[in-house]
Amino acid sequence: MRTPVVSAGHSLQLAYLRLHQALYQRTGGLIGHRLAGSPSLLLHTTGRRSGSPRTAVLIYARDGADFVLVASNDGQDRPPAWFLNVGANPAVGVQVARRRADGRARVVERGDADYPRLWRLVNDGNHRRYEGYQRRTTRPIPLVVVTPVGPLV
């Protein structure tokens, strides 16, 4: 099995994201809602193999009551683990700043009718960074739409 090559820049980005997530979690959302000038949330999933709770900090855009997420994995050729977890179990939780809600996730692929509109929405909200991530990989980057099953409280 080939070991993926990870650049120094990617390693620094991962360390930054870990620190950001730790601050977001440890402060109960008091610190951490903004990430690189964009709004971020904590996505709570269930590990597809372990069954253990997992958390990822992600940039999001709003589409009405829904949250739109991008499974970019920084333009890597493999999807992020949280995306695989959502595919195995779409019951998720979100935390936006200090407010939380349970939700249902659905994958939106490039061929879906809503994809272009949702891609523009989330890409524009992240200073068009996702375009660069898409150029780094031949993998079509999917979106995930999380619909809260109740109000954020």
Image: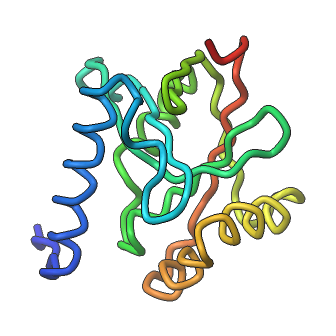
Foreground residue, 62 or 47?
Answer: 62
Q: Where residue 82 sits in the image (x, y, percent)?
A: 40, 42
Foreground residue, 139 or 73?
Answer: 73
Residue at left 53%, top 27%? 94
Q: Residue furthest right?
A: 113
User: In screen coordinates, is 43 left or right of 153?
Assistant: left
Residue 85 drawn above or below residue 58: above
Residue at left 65%, top 18%? 152
Q: How is the image coloured?
A: rainbow
Residue 74 drawn above or below residue 112: below
In which quadrant of the rendered image does the C terminus lie?
top right
Residue 18 drawn above or below residue 88: below
Residue at left 59%, top 17%? 101
Q: Where residue 6 sits in the image (x, y, percent)?
A: 16, 76
Q: Where residue 147 sits in the image (x, y, percent)?
A: 72, 28
Residue at left 29%, top 41%? 21
What is the count of numbered marks?
Answer: 0
Q: Where residue 66 sits in the image (x, y, percent)?
A: 75, 36
User: In screen coordinates, is 152 left or right of 114?
Assistant: left
In which quadrant of the rendered image does the N terminus lie?
bottom left
Q: Using the rendered view, name the quadrant where residue 51 is placed.
A: top left
User: In screen coordinates, is 128 left or right of 25?
Assistant: right
